[in-house]
Image: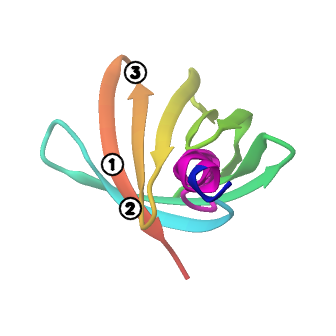
């Protein structure tokens, strides 16, 4: 019986670790987006997850924009931010202390690292 328990324990531990969420995305996140012309743009988001749906706000200097079409699946997520002339699709991955964000804006592929804000 003990041999069976020792054989099963590693598998149970594996499933617990693999299916546990790494981090909670709820709250404020900030980062700096490096643009192709070497300028920077401050990024500020407030995220909220409810039943697998990602909502929130993108805070911009001109105004705030509600996040649309937000989805989260484990540590991967996606959403759109309405911008003049369309949307800016965002995809990202959640890590224990940060978020890696990929943004497509006017055909340009941009990336940033976000950290939890205050």
Choose the circle earlier in sequence order: 2 or 1: 2
Q: Which of these two is toward me, 14 or 49?
A: 14
**Residue closest to the far right:** 51
Q: Which element type, helix, strand or loop, lies under badge 2? A: strand
Q: Is residue 21 left or right of residue 55?
A: left
Q: Specify start and end residues of the magenta stretch as a single range.
A: 4-24
Instruction: Tally the marks.
Output: 3
At label 3, counting other C-alpha atoms closer than 10 Å, the crowd grade (few under 14, some 14-19, many 20 or more) is few
79 is within the stretch colored magenta? no
Please name the residue shown 56% across and 21% down the image.
85
The residue depicted at 68 percent of the width and 38 percent of the height is: 72
Q: Position of residue 42 (x, y in %)?
A: 38, 60
Foreground: disc 1 or disc 3: 1
Q: In the drawing, what numbered circle is on residue 31? A: 2
What residue is shown with label 1? 112
Q: Which residue is rendered at x = 71% and y = 34% of the image?
A: 71
Q: Main secondary structure of the magenta part?
A: helix
Residue 94: numbered disc: none
Q: Secondary structure at mark 1?
A: strand
Q: Spatial distance from mark 1 to mark 3, Cα to Cα?
A: 16 Å
Between tags 3 and 2, which lies in front?
2
Image coordinates of residue 15 in percent, x first then y, are 61, 45
């Amino acid at each position: 019986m003990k041999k069976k328990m020792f054989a099963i324990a590693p598998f149970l531990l594996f499933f617990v670790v693999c299916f546990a969420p790494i981090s909670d995305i709820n709250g404020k996140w900030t980062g700096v987006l490096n643009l192709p012309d070497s300028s920077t743009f401050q990024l500020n988001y407030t995220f909220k997850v409810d039943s697998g749906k990602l909502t929130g706000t993108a805070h911009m200097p001109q105004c705030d924009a509600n996040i649309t079409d937000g989805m989260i699946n484990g540590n991967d997520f996606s959403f759109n931010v309405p911008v003049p002339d369309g949307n800016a699709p965002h995809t990202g991955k959640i890590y224990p202390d940060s978020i890696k964000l990929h943004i497509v804006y006017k055909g340009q592929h941009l990336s940033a690292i976000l950290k939890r804000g205050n």
